[in-house]
Amino acid sequence: MTRYDALSDTRGQAFWQGLDQLLEQPDFRDKVDRHFPVFAGFDLARRDILKCLGATLALAGLDGCERQADETAMPFVRNPAGGPGAERHYASAVELDGVGQPIIGICRDGRPVKLEGNPAHPASGGATDAFTQAALLGLYDPARSQAPRREGAPATWSEAEAMLSELAARLDQGRGMGFHLLTGPLGSPSLLRQIGELRSRWPAMRWHVHAPLAGTVPEAVLPLEKVQALVALDADPLGPGPFQTIHARGWSTRRRAYQAGDGDALLFVAEPAPTLTGVASSERLIVRPRRIEALLAALSAALNGRAAAAGLTGKEQAWVGRAAQELLRHRGAAAVVLGAHHAAALHATVEAINAGLDAPQASHAPANPQGEDLAALVAAMKAGTAKSVMVLESNPAYSAPPDLAFAGAFQRVPLRIHAGLHPDETAELVHWHLPLAHLLESWSDVTAADGSCVIVQPLVRPFFDVRSRHQVLALFGGAVADGRALVQETWDAHDGVDRWNSWLLSGRVEPAAKRSAAPVVPATAVLPVLSGPGGLDLIIRRDWSAHDGQFAHNPWLQELPRPLTKITWDNAIEVGPALAARLELENEDLAELSVGDAKVLGPVWILPGIAPDTVLVHLGYGRRAGGQVGEGVGFDAYRLRTSGASWHRPGARLRKANGHHPLASTQRHTTMAGHDFVRYVEQAGAALPPAPEKPSMYSPQPKGEGPAWGMAIDLDLCIGCNACVTACVAENNIAMVGREQVQIGREMHWLRVDRYYSGAPEDPEHVFQPVPCMHCEDAPCEMGCPVNATVHSPDGLNLQVYNRCIGTRTCQAYCPYKVRRFNWLDYVREDPPELRAARNPEVTVRDRGVMEKCTYCIQRVERAKIEADADGRPMGEVRTACQQACPTQAIVFGNLADSSSEVSRRKRDQRDFALLEEANTRPRTTYGARIRKGRKS
Amino acid sequence: MRLALVGATVVVAGATAAGAGLVRFPFITQVGLVQDQTVPFSHKHHAGELAIDCRYCHAGAETGADAGLPPTHTCMTCHSQLWTGAPMLAPVRQSYATGTPLRWSRVAQLPDYVYFDHHVHVNNGIACVECHGRMDQMPLTWRAQPFTMRFCLDCHEHPARGLRPPGMVTRMDWSDADRVFLKSFGQRAAARKHLDPLRLTNCETCHR
């Protein structure tokens, strides 16, 4: 029994409260008093403290006299390809809701340490979203299932194989009668082939798809690079989800063309609560969800030259008028998009409008409704006709609408099998739980957002006793199949064949040999008409970080500040300022939200820009199983859903409850307090007023012959998606500190994305501002450091030397931008071996008492410099991790000494400005002012 | 009182001086210290008497950051034919048969916050002997130089001193070399490669 045992049963947020809780336990206090009687009732006089300080100072130097600990060196028995320490790149993909996100996996000594977008794939172009970056940590998650389990007890694969082949024999006799397969949304051609084969072998079996985030129609993938005027009605193409990267890339291509004077980039958004698309738009109309139908009708009427129907407010009419005018002006390069969760009839109207506008073709094929929905499965289970159910990569026990009563019906099935990554809520209800291999350690294939396919190749051998999803399905065929052969069979290729090798090399099947349609998503029930009963409108959305709940166990995502609220480690009941005032609610007050029979208790967060009488909640929290990290974090918003109403529910009630639940938000202030941190220009081509050169008391920095590194961040392109922050975490071994530490402002992110509002709280203008270290040429931190641990390099980098730092935190106090992070505690030493394996070996892991900050990815700069020096050639381009991940190319890093570099071009732009110019620090990181309008006038 | 102050000053100064001396002692720097190894490998025999090239075993020296200890497979290229039954080599054969790595005590060890890269040094003409000493004369391996920051800086402050023709980096014995030629070669090479001490002694060169 160690003192840590007291912590092992804690769940979720409590997991991170460990150290303080230990100190509060009375028996622990007693033990301390027994072992250290001198400290019992310890009362120290001022002089004693000074003596101790003096002695500490005198002895501190002795630390350097310590002899280096001996180290064991263990060479490989056979060297891996490329030799020890070599970096290997493999093209592959990870999957989100059945849509492939193409990646280049970077491996060191046979283990993946970083995922980057595949520059050669049109669905990525080198960029990623936050989920893709965080998939790396998912691979190393210590909470993953590591071996098969039978009714909760450990079992072996041979037992599972015997069970499955016995089941297969039984099903062969009954042509599959009574067997149901439940999957999530699928995008793998091999998996579809395998399911197709099972269905032809057992015609009576039934296949169901459970997609908790699917709308009534599949989400459209729009060629936004061609769209000069876009009208988004309660839709969020730039928001988190499987198509964020491709949409953000397209939007940014269009926006940059507009900046350069080529056409317009207009975005009209009508929505009940702010989304990333709404925030990026300058024509944002706040409406309650029930108004979308009327707006669409009015827009359709206006486009056809008819008078708009009555009943629109003046503001709505003006918005519709402007939107229609711009759509018509840009015929051929204009489009309307409606949220996928709206009724199919409304989508028909949108399609008609788009056809009339000659809109660029959305590349997504219509849904392929081969699989039945979850309700059909529950009906079969309740009727007792379901004799055996296999759940593959889905978690209906958590994410099914409560009115289906999935768990109760499921438990009536005589044989229940679950195959998944985690021992989740569904796994707790089954007879057999089969652990699956993570996509980064298995062979598979997946359809990407542009419709082309990617062969998924393993970056590492599986760590645990797991099988790929294809191997598990193949077990019905009897023998254990080779994972690679199963995929090759789909593509009619085998090892050594040229085209198979070229697919693996490029990360893209060319030509799209078997172009699969959109991921299979079942049509769910139609949105009920939101006629107006009293009460509030409840909006339920996927979460920025937890998505549908599958990432609730990922600390990189949990600690990622949500773009608009900047809350970490929680979800909240989000309401507008007026509603909060009426109900006398303050931030972090507990409130009871009820709709129909369902109710949840959660903390309130006041979100500007939300429609009146509207409440917003996010899915994916309140997990009850699957791992310590996510369990007990937030409240479960799935409980507010019904199978008929997944996204909007009218008639909700909100009531102040007793109590307070402190939230860990990283940005409490929302105004700029008189500073102009963020600047605007009215339209493309406009200039900011020139900044006069100020005198400086600093001596000029020595100018080297080499490069001068700098960064430019275009606020007009930043959509606040957080991909850069996650990429920085993955690249630079940034420690996750947990909820309590974030609450007291000790988060360790080197790059933060600030969010500012301007205008009225009910309808503000939003803007995001990524803030890394500014690498000031006249850096106050360098003046403050008493031990010269932060110094300037000749190529303009502001360096932090960890082994010199003694942790006075003077630099942090001197930094006007507050980008320096201090290791208050030892956040990493107790990390399990799995998490150590995920670290980037090129970056020092920082210890307690050391200051750290953005280094401009100095390991990448040094690597490029060393490779150039070793080969005797000039240094090439360097890309930082944040720049690499950014889907809109808002961040550009490069050599300012080279006037032809992209960063030099951005800095010559008249929109370029320095943050806190009045501090006269001459930062190397500068910003491009945001452009208010999307058209030249 | 005054005596006590003087005494205290002397004690503090003495302790500082002793500490500063202590870090230069071989006990701390481990120069010349031979460690127990699983297999008593002799560089003197292999590199000296048999004249096997350094890079046969340390293959990464020219291509990567890590020169690399040889994998068991490399040992067995010869020892599957020679000394196949020698008891001394039993751990090597066992490692090869079972696939478990050999465990060596590391001799050339740098702190974790130092990022040393072999190939940029080797390809630019820093000879092995500069840091590793006369390996061809070591029956058992020891550290030839104190791997302190001062040792690294000595070279980075005067890059011309250590530069040799890149084709000759594995040469161990330079006693009969033409001193004048080496000096002028080093100066010319340093100028050609723009080896600026200001850049080479910058923190980020080794620490990141």
Image (cartoon, rainbow, N blue to C red):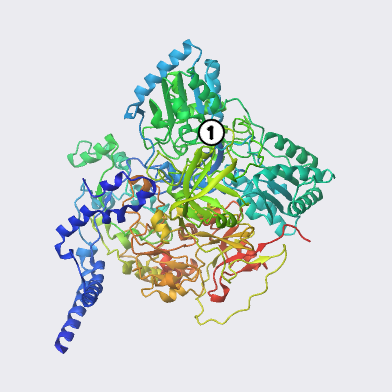
- Disc 1: which residue: A445
| On screen, residue A185 above or below A750 | above
* Picture quadrant where residue A687 is located: bottom right
Which residue type does callout 1 highlight?
Asp
Position of residue A934 measured from the top left corner of the image (x, y, whole percent): 72, 57
Q: Which residue appears at 69% of the width and 48% of the height?
A: A225
| On screen, residue A898 above or below A600 | below
Q: Secondary structure at mark 1?
A: strand
Q: How many marks?
A: 1
Position of residue A782 measured from the top left corner of the image (x, y, whole percent): 44, 73
Q: Nearer the viewer, residue A613 or B198?
A: A613
* Quadrant, the C terminus of chain A: bottom right
For label 1, count other residues whose C-alpha is less than 10 Å away and answer few (under 14), some (14-19) or many (20+): many
| On screen, residue A211 above or below A919 | above
* Picture quadrant where residue A825 is located: bottom left
Q: Nearer the viewer, residue A29 or B94?
A: A29
Relative to A756, A319 lies left or right: right
Position of residue A417 measured from the top left corner of the image (x, y, whole percent): 42, 25
Q: Residue furthest top?
A: A173
Relative to B42, A186 lies left or right: right
Q: Residue furthest right?
A: A305
Residue B202 seen: yes
Position of residue A780 measured from the top left corner of the image (x, y, whole percent): 47, 75
Q: Which residue appears at 48% of the width and 32% of the height?
A: A396
Disc 1: host chain? A
Relative to A672, B159 lies left or right: left
